[in-house]
Amino acid sequence: MSDIPAPPPDSPGPEPEPAPAATGQSRARLTGSVIIQAITQGSSAVITILAIFLALVVGGVLIVFSDPVVTRAWSSFFANPGYALGQTWDSVSFAYSQMFEGAILNPSTISAAAHGGSIAAIFYPLSSTCAQATPLILTGLSVAVAFRCGLFNIGAAGQWVGGAVVATWLGFGVSLPPVIHVVVCVIGAFIGGAVIGWFVGLLKARTGAHEVIVTIMLNYVMYDLLEYLLSHPAMLQQPGQTNEIAPFIANDANLGHVGGPPPQVGVGFLIAVAAALACAWLLARTTTGFQFRTVGASPSAARTAGINVERSWILVMLLAGGLAGLSAAAVVQGTNTQLTFNSYGTYGPDGITVALLGRARPIGVVLAGLLFGALHVGGTYVEAATLGQVPADIVQVLEGLVVLFVAAPALIRAVFRLRTTAGTGMEAVAKGWNG
């Protein structure tokens, strides 16, 4: 055994034999390739569903603690246990039912439509969810595609700003025919984000600069650039304004609403779904996608096979930046028609979360984006329905819990007493933190 050479660090090879009992159990070393494989391999759909269920259970506990009526009922639990349990059920079920009605379907709109009310109102909650999910899906795809090539794209926010700046300028500063104007703005947004991503890939390929550091720093550069552009009337600031706000883009540059408002969902959602299908086809059916996946699995093995690793890094970051730029187009030309300094919001960080939950697979990213979009819409609705008793911030807690539980399949198996399997996916990462 001692004469067999060890495999290269980046190449998938046999696990090293366990150390003797006297030296303790060896742990896998945490490397970038291990994390990438953990994200892309993931765990079964059953684990994911159970993780979401467990997150809802923990969220229900938090809802109970935020309800003073329920806490008072539990203070006299032994005197009247039925009342305490009933109040608990009423509080949790009401909150989650309101979240469902706000994000998916409100039964009252069906009965209202049957008596002459608006049929479009039935689809309003679902359309709001799709509208919220659109930028999340596109930034999630931006992160996921880079993951598949072994890169951590932490710079979706900066790439979003690049796309938003170009789309905004083309939207109000260029006069074009209606349909052409929309298409030019969308393409411009893709190019604006792609240039930022391309620069990251170029630095990675030419100098070896780590993409995490470069993208994080570029985020701040793009934030400052946006602030500068929105502070000068000669640049992007709206004339006569002192606030950091750009002019409204032209009406013929807006992305239309599917069926008209309501529903709120726009053409941007169709672009997001089309982008996900295109990414799935690219990764699974093309030579370039195969090269991306091979480089992500092992750069050294890819080089041995004759793949230009540096070229793959540049191409995948260019594509990732373009997808983030499309997310900006969906917001600037869709839900908002005016760029402000805060327009980028949390789309970048949320895209990382969506990509993790979607296991860096395009279809999984779409489903994760829809889930988070529903949580965002439902959280706002439940806060209004409970008069602020259940804050909308509960959504952020639920999102964090979902990702936490999905990233810890061993915990889910222990809680639900599922059969233990070999350490793969996120379990491999958990074993490597102390390596």
Image (cartoon, helix red, strand yellow):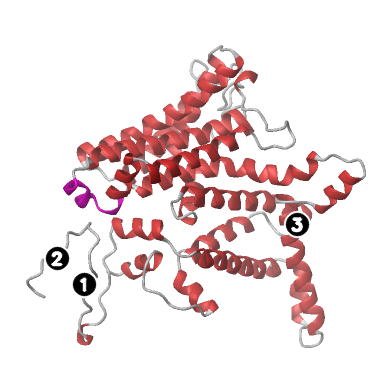
Indicate the position of residue 424 as horizontal and vertical percent values.
Answer: 37, 67
Foreground label between 3 and 1: 1
Q: Residues under labels 3 and 1: Cα distance?
A: 52 Å
Q: Residues within 10 Å of mark 3 (few under 14, many from 20)?
A: many
Q: What residue type is labelled 2?
A: Ala
Q: Which amino acid does label 1 sit on?
A: Pro
In the rendered structure, the answer to whether residue 87 lies left or right of residue 144 reads right
x 39%, y 68%: residue = 427
Secondary-structure class at tag 1: loop
Q: Quadrant of residue 307?
A: top left
x 54%, y 77%: residue = 416
Q: Find the magenta span and give its range.
A: 296-305
Foreground label between 3 and 2: 2
Q: Residues under labels 1 and 2: Cα distance?
A: 9 Å
Labelled pair 1, 2 in contact (Cβ < 8 Å):
yes
Q: Quickly name the residue at label 1.
A: 16
x 46%, y 44%: residue = 141
Q: Quickly name the residue at label 3.
A: 98
